[in-house]
């Protein structure tokens, strides 16, 4: 599929009549999609943000995967759907390719229209954003970001991505800020080439799950808590967090994703942040209360789909 061309997937789904797809105003229902590179989570929720139903779909080809997404939702009356997708994506509503995955390294998904086929098939408004923005929105509404106005959400898993959220909205520029591709000072003696297909030793190439496995020859899940891998991981994540503190001055940095299930990383990261800041940022949260500045995601792996449901409520103009 060439860049910027309408997706042929639109012809695979029969459009629905909008009025027959809507739930009753007394009991509105919303759909949320967290589209990842290995799996897609689909859920329905109510106006309070509670998840009602959920399913997981293996990410295969665009045609098979989007067909399965539509099949899950098609008999469920909905007001709107929110989609948080792996990227890079076009998240500009004014762009002719809004809702497309763009130059992703995932084979077969380059320049794929994700939003269009879902909206065409279900006949309801579909909001679309990057997966990390959806996860940050989930933490804003019901997680570790609910008590602050400005925060960074950083996910460390198959890749590394970040979102700067202020007043419930992500920072946007010409493109989504690619925090995962920052270049960082190397740890002393570290000659690992890095694992990012674009930049080699950027943050993602040094600290994402596949980079850990490539460096040590074992899956992160198989490494013990006292393995030297975690000191290296804390070094790079700590520097990244210190850089974000200096450039964006967020009230909090929330760390999520599969790698961050290792809770022993948090005190190690805070130590590196303190060392790198060197006392320059004169605020108690950067000095005495780093445990309030660098925190785990409160919703865990739920934040993406919870954020997608919040996007759907916003698209349907429900307060959330």
Image (cartoon, rainbow, N blue to C red):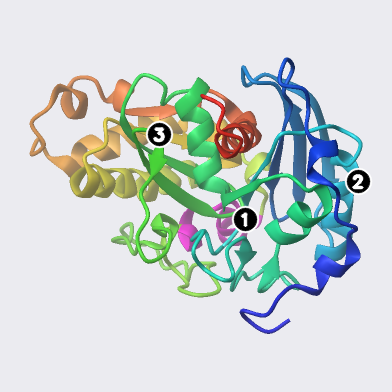
Instruction: Give how far apart the Cα atoms at labels 2 and 1 are.
Output: 21 Å
Q: Badge 3 is on which residue?
A: 168
Residue drawn at (31%, 58%) of the image:
188
Q: Which range is magenta?
A: 204-217
Image marks 2 and 1: residues in contact by CB distance under 8 Å: no
Give left or right: position of 82 versus 192. Answer: right
| Element assignment for label 3 | loop
Residue drawn at (32%, 24%) of the image:
148
Instruction: Give how far apart the Cα atoms at labels 1 and 3 are.
Output: 20 Å
Magenta span includes 206: yes
In depth, the one of 15 and 228 nearer the eye is: 15
Give left or right: position of 31 versus 88. Answer: right
Residue density around tag 3, few if under 14, some if 14–19, many if 20 or more, within 10 Å: many
Q: Badge 2 is on which residue?
A: 71
Give left or right: position of 216 versus 63. Answer: left
| Element assignment for label 1 | loop
Q: Which quadrant of the figure has residue 67?
A: bottom right
Residue drawn at (63%, 65%) of the image:
100
Instruction: Give how far apart the Cα atoms at labels 2 and 3 are.
Output: 31 Å
- Residue 86, labelled with which disc? 1
The disc, 2 or 3, on the residue closer to the chain's N-terminal end is 2
Residue 57, x across and y down, in percent: 84, 46
Q: Is residue 237 visible?
A: yes
Residue 228, x across and y down, in percent: 48, 44
| Element assignment for label 2 | helix
Residue 118, x across and y down, in percent: 77, 53
In depth, the one of 114 and 267 nearer the eye is: 114
- Residue 210, labelled with which disc? none
């Amino acid at each position: 599929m060439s860049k910027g061309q309408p997706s042929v997937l639109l012809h695979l789904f029969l459009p629905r009549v909008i009025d027959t797809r809507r739930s009753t105003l007394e009991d509105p229902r919303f759909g949320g999609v967290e589209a990842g590179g290995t799996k897609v989570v689909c859920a329905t929720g109510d106006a309070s943000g509670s998840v009602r139903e959920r399913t997981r779909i293996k990410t295969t080809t665009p045609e098979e995967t989007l067909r399965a997404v539509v099949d899950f939702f098609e008999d469920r009356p909905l007001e709107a759907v929110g989609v948080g997708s792996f990227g890079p994506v076009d998240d500009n509503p004014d762009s002719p390719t809004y809702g497309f995955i763009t130059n992703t390294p995932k084979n077969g998904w380059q320049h794929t229209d994700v939003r269009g086929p879902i909206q065409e098939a279900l006949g309801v408004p579909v909001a679309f954003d990057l997966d990390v923005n959806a996860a940050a929105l989930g933490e804003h509404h019901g997680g570790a970001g609910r008590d602050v106005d400005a925060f960074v959400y950083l996910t460390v898993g198959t890749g590394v991505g970040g979102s700067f959220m202020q007043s419930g909205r992500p920072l946007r520029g010409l493109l989504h800020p690619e925090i995962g591709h920052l270049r960082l000072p190397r740890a002393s003696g570290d000659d690992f080439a890095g694992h990012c297909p674009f930049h080699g030793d950027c943050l993602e190439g040094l600290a994402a799950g596949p980079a850990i496995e490539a460096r040590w020859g074992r899956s992160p899940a198989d490494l013990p808590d006292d393995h030297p891998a975690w000191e290296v991981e804390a070094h790079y994540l700590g520097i990244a967090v210190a850089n974000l503190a200096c450039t964006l001055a967020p009230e909090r940095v929330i760390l999520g994703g599969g790698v961050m299930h290792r809770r022993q990383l948090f005190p190690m990261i805070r130590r590196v942040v303190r060392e790198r800041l060197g006392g320059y940022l004169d605020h108690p949260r950067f000095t005495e209360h780093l445990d309030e500045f660098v925190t785990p995601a409160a919703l865990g792996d739920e934040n993406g789909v919870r954020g997608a449901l919040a996007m759907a409520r916003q698209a349907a103009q429900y307060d959330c």
